[in-house]
Amino acid sequence: MRRRSAASSRPLRRSVDVAAALFAGAACVALLALLCSPPAAAIDAGALTPAERAAILALGPWPPAPIRDPANPASGRSDGITLGETLFYSPRLSPTGLRCASCHEPWRHFADGRVVAQGVTAGSRNTPGLLDAARHRHYGWDGAHDALWQQSLRPLEDAREMPASAAQVATLMRGDATLSARLAAVFGEPPGSPGAGDALVLREVGLALAAYVETLATPRTPFDDWRDRLASAAGAGEPATSGVFPAAARRGLRLFVGRGGCAACHAGPTLGDDGFHVSLVHSLMATGSPDAGRRGEPPNAFRTPGLRDVAATAPYLHDGSAAALCDALQPHAADPGTLPPPLTAADRRDLVAFLHTLSASGATDAAPSCEP
Amino acid sequence: MHRIAITRLSFLSLLAVFAVASAHAAGGGGGGGGGGGMTTLSNGKLSAADPEYTQGVAEIEAAHFPQAVTLLESYVSRSAAHAQDADAQNWLGYAYRKSGNLDAAFLHYDKALAINPRHRGAHEYMGEAYLMTGNIAQAEEHLKALDKLCFTPCTEYSQLKHEVASWKAAHAATVGSK
């Protein structure tokens, strides 16, 4: 018994020794880190600089005044909006029974939760959410359209998505007395005759869909409350952090507008500049060829998405390859040109904490831990 | 013996508490109805004692769907709070579907799920509505969602699973006969 216990204590002693050595090593590393790098807590706790303050205020206020499209007769009209709503949720626009809401699901914040879009066949890009779409100047990851009504028709006609023809859509709108009357009420004339009139009916369907999508907007968030209190704070004062806007979110926000360089592209109240920037993530189209992104721009340039409500719309990036927000930050962190120095795991945790405050309900994404 | 009986009782109580907790965690899933899985509402919410709402549900149970649509449309239109009643939106979707208006059925199922993404009844009926349009892939998406939501066995999952299997069998037979 005694011998056995003596023998069994040896590995225990070894592990104690190893643990002590590891502890001492870790303590040295921590001490070196303290001596060699700026104390993060001191930076984070310090007052905002005037530049940081201005950059933070530029991310609001929210919500801005509603946007109406003067080129769309249905825009802002209640009958146009409700017609668009009916069509958005209808399974009759597509011969497959697919609806706009099949991929832009309201319960998934008007995204679909899939890696890439799934129409009648799989697509090659992640489905963008529709909230705040009225504020875009370009639509789709490649900005193929610059009008919401045109973009509304894109999946409808795409052979991989819904797919419907102008003739099918026009037949539906003419054949249903209620839809026909509603279309006539909004656009001033009944659906035209078959043939040449089909394209006109399809256009009006796109306009009605756009009128509805224009109404889909993200609500105010904990960040907006904090930002507005900052705007009204006297002098260099700033609001306190809280449970819904914690200290980690404040650190993440400072990174976002400062060292992280995020606000260079994720700018303005939507936190997206609607511009095209070269992505470090390369992906393939369904055909197997590289996805070149925006035509007329350098290869692999994609539209910068807005970040409001982003925590609720995983997965991320144009190819849906990032399952969680931390994963989405990783390719950005690897870009020495735009983000010097690279983001650490702690930086990414703070950024994710900030991004969570851009959702009204305190949404959390799949993997908020941001392990190195 | 007495001790065993008490232990069993405690175990059953625990199971009951667990089942209730699971149902609550799953979002209640009320507002069911139709098919083989007619479920009764059990909520203490806005709708519980509302005559228009309860009459609307009664009309559904009596298969008077147009009357149910009228009553439930009036109920959800009464205020913003009423419009946020996921059970009412789900019942309204059901009444529209049974009236043959799939456009409105989908719209109201979507509203129910937007209010409560864990609403089991709305997932089941959305899946069944997709089956009516012939879109099996979308129906199976809602079956998957129910599979995640139903930590313990639930009628919404088993009912939609049955409907999907029936649809597949019927579809296979149709294809085979051509």
Image: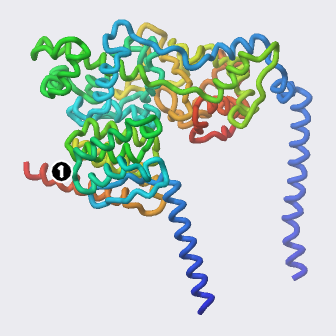
Q: Quadrant of the C terminus of chain A?
A: top right
Residue B129 visible here: no
Could you tell me which secondary element the residue under label 1 belongs to?
helix
- Count every numbered label the image shows and give the total: 1
Above or below for A142 versus A363: above
Q: Position of residue A320 (x, y in %)?
A: 48, 32
A269 on left or right of A13: left
Q: Residue at image x 7%, y 48%? A: B178
A327 on left or right of A210: right
Q: Position of residue A204 (x, y in %)?
A: 25, 16
Q: Residue at image x 57%, y 38%? A: A365
Q: Position of residue B168 (x, y in %)?
A: 22, 53
The residue type indicated by label 1 comes to His
Q: Nearer the viewer, residue A16 or B134?
A: B134
Q: Quadrant of the N terminus of chain A?
A: bottom right
Q: Residue at image x 24%, y 13%? A: A187
Q: Nearer the viewer, residue A81 or A109?
A: A81
Q: Position of residue B65 (x, y in %)?
A: 23, 48
Above or below for A102 versus B120: above
Q: Residues within 10 Å of mark 1 (few under 14, many from 20)?
A: some
Residue B132 visible here: yes
Q: What colour-coding does the image apply?
A: rainbow
Residue at the far bottom: name it.
B1
- Give the quarter of the image for residue A363: top right
- Residue at mark 1: B171
Residue at the far front: name it.
B51
Q: Nearer the viewer, residue B20 or A355?
A: B20
B7 on left or right of A180: right
Q: Chain of mark 1?
A: B
A283 on left or right of A369: left
